[in-house]
Image (tube, coloured by chain):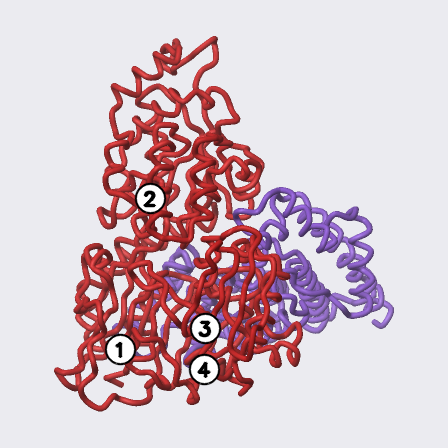
Chain colours: A red, B purple
Amino acid sequence: MRTLRYLALLALVLIMAGCGAAPQAATTPVVQPTTAATEVAAATSAATSEATVEATVEATTEPTEVATEPVMGGTVTRAITAEPTSLDPHAAPGSGQNIILPYIFETLIFRDMDNTYKPYLAKSWEISEDGLSVTFVLRDDVIFHDRTPLNAEAVVFTFNRFKDAKTSAGEGLAMMTGVEAVDEYTVRFTFSAPSAVFFSTLVTPYASIVSPTAVAAAGDAFGQQPVGTGPFKLAEWQQGTAVVLERNSDYAWAPETISNAGAPYIDNVVFKVIPDAATQLAALQAGEVDLIFVNSPNHISKLKEDSSVQMIETQMNSMIYLGFNLAKTPLDDVKVRQALSHAINKDEIQMAALNGMGEVAFAPMAPTLPGFDPSLKDLELGYDPAKATELLTEAGFAPGPDGTMTKDDQPLNFVLLTFARAPNEDVATLIQNQLKAIGVNVEIQQFDTATAAKAATEGQFHLILWRYDRNDADVLNVNLHSDRIGSSNRFGYSNPAVDALLDQAAQELDEVKRAALYVEAQKLIMPDAPWQPLYIPVDVLAISKRVEGFHLASMGRILLQDAQVVAP
Amino acid sequence: MFGYLLKRLISAALVLVAVSILVFALLNVIPGDVAQTLAGDSASQEQIAAKRRELGLDRPLPVRYLEFAQGVVHGDLGKSAISGRPVSTLLMERFGATVNLALAALALAVFFGLLAGTIAALRAGGYVDLLVMMFTTLGESLPSFWFSLLLIQFFALHLGWLPVLGAGTLAHLVLPAISLALPAIALIARMVRGCLLDVKNADFVRTAHAKGLSHFAVWREHIFRNAILPVITMLGLYLGNLLGGAFIIETIFAWPGLGRLVVQAIFDRDFPVVIGAVLLIALIYQVLNILVDLAHAWFDPRVGTEAM
């Protein structure tokens, strides 16, 4: 709560400081593009470029060739809010870590912006008829930073280590029964049942291939001395300050979406640990960092006036929702849940949370995930306070003496649980007001993440303002399958027909058929109202114009193999 | 003197034991633990319980405390539950930056605080005095994070003289040290002025003047020496405060100090790191307290170490 108050104050301070500050043009580097031919390209699909409202980059499906000689050397500096505790891909997932891992490590396959899987360290792969085994053929020209060759043995070692680590990131390997080397460059995975989530697990940084010799040499310290096959390698870790990566000059195996198959043009990527958002902004404007993510509306409008910075709106596979605890009466009554859903004015929330940026959510699946379908909008329990009151009356509630809806002398008093992260407090307060309007009292309980997670797992709430970040459509299995009641299904939601569809989708390896199954599941879920989708959070990437040629990839990654530093 | 020091050291050790027991118990009362953090957002209660067993968190509190205490006696503070790195290494990595910043802020505070306070006392009631008093009111009431952001805006962005953030060179030290020192400068100036004025009107000062001592000698030997004692006590506490980590300033300037490490560890429920850091901070306070008492004895011979 205290930190939250400080953050709110900081935001206020920034507005005040902004009023008094003179123009920053004097100190921020002025960008002079070296040649007109050096075009910035962003590998984005049509779907995401629609969402890229403020994009000033030329969004194309294929990166533009750099016609002239690339500018060699230079450093790109990115601000990170939290320092990673470990750079071992198989350590417990944490923030900071998953940003840095993809530069040092690589995965067997990657996911393109259109949600299709593409070759990476694996040249090709084959799924058996029954879906119970998947065979990958590896590239034969890849070496780790310690010059150990990448081969089947390294992949087998990696996946056994990943599975044994039993981290939450490794859940997608649950169906995997074994992994074996068929020959020097062929690996076969076997499964007890076909597993769609296996592929989306492979593209996460946690499934990065590690050097077996480096792991053996470093032991527990591998997290401080990571060795992968990526375009950059760890040069120095200044604890508490920065993680410095340097160019891997051996690199020659970039995927097709990158123009430069060889070593990166830039010398270094530096990740500076800057916990405070206002300082990140100042550092960008002073030229001390090149790349930050902003989400405060004030910071965004401030940066829009800065001609040396370009801004790109990016969407993560995330959603903010209001969940209901079905284990608590009267929330076990679907009419009550529908009534509460109808009482929520999402436009007002979007205005408060995102200042009108981004978009309102209507279906359980985020728009960037497979299984999202615009036609589901018809099933949305939209804002309709009259309908809400009507549904509550049907459920047997009537206004009590103080106006609170009451049934059998039990007034509707709910606890709303959420975690401390802007703008949750504002959103929770809005929900409180909106529900008050239909005669429902809400008490907001906001805690730090660890405390809130414990309360959520133990079901100590009626309403929960929560968020999911997941790169696969199986987010519905994780949150709404009845097998997960008591863990990630915090709502106690159970519908056998939904369970059957989710089970089927989990084993469907054809992406199109799988997406269709998820659409069917959502058609059943939405009238049940286990949660009300609120909005899709947006992060705005602000990057100095001295950096050109970076690529935006799925899951918010920024690839720098083609990047050049065009101004000092 | 020696007996006194021994007594003080024994009591300091007892305080540390008490602090460690208290913190150990407190940390186990707050909801959420590192098993939850490690097991992840979608973990079931069984998975969390398994993780807790793996980490040994399911054993009774006294057993865990005794194990921890045994380690401490052997100079081992244990390992971070999150990163697996030794707590002593984590603390030492950060302590250097904290000491640098604390000493720089202390130096600024002592120099400017004494200067401003003395000038104000010498010119009590005049315009200079009024000006200093206005400054101290402002310095004490400005929120440090707000003042820090103003400093960044002006000196780093507008003038471009100093870096926005980070550590390493002297230039990096300037802004955070000023931000940290500002309230202390104000406080010290106010205190020095008050104490000097109090002592100035004391009987022994009149006697000293009557003896025919020069104005300067009276101030140096009689007034200043007596007025400085409460200031030293305050400085000891202030330095302890600084060395315990200045979380807000460290966060704003991305300074790699102890404060940020501890607050992050609290959020992660990384108890070994929290306990190690609290013990370190408690130790610093104990040492500073002893030093302050010794300084008292040095400045004021009447404060005999035997009597204390």
For mark 4, name the chain: B
For mark 1, name the chain: A
Distance, label 4 to label 2, CA atoms, is 61 Å
Say whether residue A20 is visible: no
Q: What residue did someone put label 2 on?
A: A516
N-term mark: 3 or 2:
3
Residue at the image position 25 percent from the left and 19 percent from the top: A386
Q: Position of residue A161 (x, y in %)?
A: 61, 66
For mark 2, name the chain: A
Q: Nearer the viewer, residue B27 or B286?
A: B27
Q: What residue did someone put label 3 on?
A: A106
Q: Are marks 3 and 1 on the same chain?
A: yes
Q: What's under tag 1, amino acid-wise?
A: Val
Secondary element at tag 4: helix
Front label number (4 vs 2)? 2
Q: What's under tag 3, amino acid-wise?
A: Glu
Q: Are marks 1 and 4 on the same chain?
A: no
Q: Position of residue B222 (x, y in %)?
A: 61, 71
Secondary element at tag 3: loop
Q: Position of residue B291 (x, y in %)?
A: 70, 70
Q: Which mark is residue A547?
A: 1
For mark 3, name the chain: A
Q: Nearer the viewer, residue B120 or A49?
A: A49
Q: What's under tag 4, amino acid-wise?
A: Leu
Distance, label 3 to label 2, CA atoms, is 31 Å
Q: Are marks 3 and 2 on the same chain?
A: yes
Quarter-of-image position of residue A555: bottom left
Q: Position of residue B23 (x, y in %)?
A: 69, 52
N-term mark: 3 or 1:
3
Distance, label 3 to label 1, CA atoms, is 23 Å
Distance, label 1 to label 4, CA atoms, is 29 Å
For label 2, count other residues whose C-alpha is less than 10 Å away and answer few (under 14), some (14-19) or many (20+).
some
